[in-house]
């Protein structure tokens, strides 16, 4: 099954992985888990519990793998602006602690 889903953290294509993602699936590039709230189509930073699915259990750590039955990977999870900000912050820290 072909899909256009990319890793929420690094933007790498996840086309080689089959759906549905298992709880232990990782991004082949950055090795972050994929069955996480930040990767789900129901995730929304602007609603209570940051989940639009009323029946879902509350998950405190949005970047940790979970057992949510409502999980569906989103093809909109990757945010290039958020990645750019993280890359800039990482570069600033590297420059600060550079030998």
Image (spheres, rainbow, N blue to C red):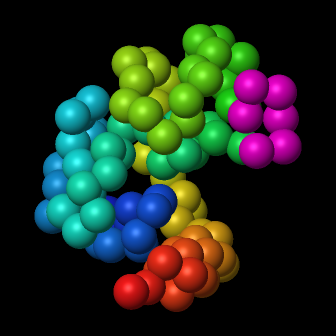
Out of 26 and 43, give the one closest to the viewer: 26
Q: Quadrant of the C terminus?
A: bottom left
* Position of residue 95 in the picture relative to residue 98 (left or right): right
- Relative to 10, does residue 43 appear above or below in the rendering? above
Where's residue 55, x and y in %?
Answer: 64, 12
Q: Quadrant of the N terminus?
A: bottom left
* Position of residue 19 in the picture relative to residue 76 (left or right): left
The residue shown at (37%, 37%) is 35
* Quadrant in which residue 50 is drawn: top right
- Relative to 58, does residue 75 appear above or below in the rendering? below
The residue shown at (39%, 62%) is 7
- Relative to 64, does residue 77 appear above or below in the rendering? below
Q: Which residues are magenta?
A: 45-50
* Quadrant in which residue 41 is drawn: top right
User: Furthest residue to the front?
Assistant: 99
Where's residue 89, x and y in %?
Answer: 61, 76
Total numbered labels: 0
Residue 23 is inside the magenta segment: no
Where's residue 42, x and y in %?
Answer: 62, 38
Where's residue 24, x and y in %?
Answer: 21, 34
Out of 13 and 81, give the one closest to the viewer: 81
The residue shown at (19%, 62%) is 28
Whether residue 40 is visible here, answered yes or no, is no
Whether residue 85 is visible here, answered yes or no, is yes
The residue shown at (63%, 16%) is 58
Out of 53 and 63, give the one closest to the viewer: 63
* Position of residue 85 in the picture relative to residue 28 (left or right): right
């Amino acid at each position: 099954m072909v899909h256009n889903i990319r890793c929420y953290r690094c933007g790498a294509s996840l086309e080689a992985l089959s759906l549905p993602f298992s709880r232990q699936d990782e991004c082949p590039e950055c090795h972050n888990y994929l069955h996480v709230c930040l990767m789900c189509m129901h995730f929304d930073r602007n609603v209570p519990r940051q989940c639009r699915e009323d029946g879902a259990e509350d998950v405190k750590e949005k970047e940790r793998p979970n057992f949510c039955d409502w999980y569906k990977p989103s093809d909109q999870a990757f945010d290039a602006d958020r990645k750019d900000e993280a890359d800039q912050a990482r570069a600033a820290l590297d420059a600060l602690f550079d030998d």
